[in-house]
Each structure stands twice: as structure tokens, then as C-alpha cells.
Amino acid sequence: MDEDLVLVQAAQAGDLDAFDQIITRYQSTVTAMLHRFSVSRADLEDMVQETFVRAWRALPQWRPDKPFLHWLKRIAANIGLEFCRRHQRSPFSRLVQPTEEGHPLDHIASHEGATSGDDLTGVQFILSHLPPDDRALLTLLHLEQLPLNEIAAHFGWSKVKAKVKAFRARQRLKTILTRHGYTLE
Amino acid sequence: MDTPSNNARSWDRLTRRARSASAPEDVDVRAAVRAEISSPQPQFQAASLFDEVVVLFRSRWLQAGFAVLALSAFFTCHQSLDVVNEIAWIWQFQGPVLAGI
């Protein structure tokens, strides 16, 4: 923790080498978190890069009374939310009726040989049918397993607003899942 | 559409397996980040008001807004045409009625 402080203070003073060390220290954590939003290598690298670029620009605002990693994760969560907004599906995608071959959502990870990577892709595909805020919230809640309080703090929402949003997001998710033969349990 | 699946598929199980998917370990953005933060930030130059307006009018949302406005104005006029005709028709009877009184 003290080493964090030394490095961050050096970076705040404009030391690029110190910031390099910060990146080396935290890029795997940030990558793991943002991997929940997209498995695409290009998108993932873009998001990780953007997280550290924004962190560099916002460094003067960081105060030592808050853990640096928590602050960094907050930036990463917002990058994830922006990713969801940029890659939002048309609202009509939720109205797509199954054809004779079925609906793409019917075939997600239904086979036994599916890897955990396939399952993650499937979960991301299902969540991509939700509005961006819901998608980001449920990604952090169900995949990153962050507590709701922390998610609210990351997105600058009140706890009540986060609870209401989570309830509505789960309802929308349940509708989609039920329609395609999944159970929430 | 709402048919139950032939094999029970659980969201919980799917997310549990998805959580164990490992992120690529060889992501290294140090060079890219350094290149970006070392490059000079583009300086904002105040464009002329005319340029700002031109840029504003190129935005899709504004064009769409004007299109919607024009369409709604057209429909309002189109629908109120009958009403205007009706008022004119009543008006032309008003003269004889008033004259009778």
C-alpha cells in the first residue's frame, strides 16, 4: 500500500516510469475486470488502455485517503459502462421472433462440451440484449460479483437507485431468459 | 416463443462457469499508454460561430429533429384543413342569420 502511495505520488509529479510500474502492477486486475464486458481481444485492449490513460489524466484528483486500486476500478467500471453504451443493440432486437432454426439465444452453451470461455461469450451475448446500464450493472453483479454498494459507488448512483435499477434489470433479464428456456436459478 | 427448453438451462450455472473463464494474461498496454499520454493533447481552438452552426446542423439528431418537426407541422396543417373549411362554411351562414335577426 505504501509502495502504491510512493508510485502514485511520483506519477502525480509527472514521472512516466512510475506510472509504467503502476500499469505493470494493476493491468492484470483491470484486464480481468474488463474481460467480463468483452472477450474480444481488440476491445479488451482498447478498454484497458483507455482506463490507464484516463487514470493518468485524473491522477491529480486522486487522494491518498482512498485505496488506489478501488479508484482505478471505478474508472474501469465506467469504461465498461461506456463500452455497453457504444455496443448497444437496437431495442427491436428484444422483439426478434424465433425462426424455424430457433433464436440465437436458444443455442447458448447448451452443449456439454462448451468451455468457460464459450459460457462467458454466451452470458455477454444474453446481457447485450439489455439496455446498457442494466448490462453493465449485471455484468459487475453476476460476473465480477461486486456488492451492489460498490457498483453504486463506481457509477455514482445512490444505494436506493442502484437497488431499483438492479431489480428492474433482473426483471428484464428474467423475461429474456424465460422466453429462451432458461431459469434464473 | 415461450416454449420451455428441452434441457433445463440455468442462468446461475452459466454465469458460474463464465466466471471461471480466464482473461488473457499477455495484455500489456504500457507502450500504448505511454505513447498516448506523451503525445501532445489536441488544443481546442475556438472556431467561428458560422463553423459551429454548420457542424451543429450536420449532426444527425438535429436533422432528425427538424424532419420530425416538419412532418408534425405538415400533419397538423393537413388535419386542421377540414376544421378551417368547416369554420368558413359556418361563417358564410352567419351573415344571413344575423341579417334575419
Image: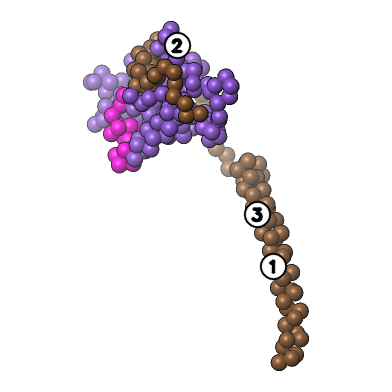
Q: Is A163 left or right of B33, judged from the image as shown?
A: left
Q: Nearer the viewer, residue B95 or A65?
A: B95
| Colour-to-chain, brown | B
Query: In the drawing, what numbered circle is on residue A111?
Result: 2
Q: CA distance from mark 3 to mark 1?
A: 17 Å
Q: Nearer the viewer, mark 2 or mark 1?
A: 2
Residue A25 appears left or right of B35: left
- Amino acid at pointer 3: Ser
Can you identify the residue that label 3 sits on? B72
Q: Mark 3 falls on what kind of element? A: helix
- Give the residue drawn at x 55%, y 37%: B44
Residue at the top extreme of this rendering? A113
Q: Is residue A155 above or below residue B62?
A: above
Of circles 2 and 3, the one toward us is 2
Q: Amino acid at mark 1?
A: Val
Callouts 2 and 3 close, C-beta under 8 Å: no
User: What chain does mark 2 sit on?
Assistant: A
SS for tag 1? helix
Other-residue count near label 3 (Cα within 10 Å), few / some / many at <14 / 14–19 / ≥20: few
- Mark 3 vs mark 1: in front: 1
The quadrant in which the C terminus of chain A is found is: top left
Given contact means CB atoms under 8 Å apart, are the residues at marks 2 and 1 in contact?
Answer: no
Could you tell me which residue is drawn at 43 percent across and 27 percent down?
Answer: A177
Type of amino acid under label 2: His
Magenta-drawn segment? A145-163
Residue at horizontal 44%, vertical 24%? Answer: B4
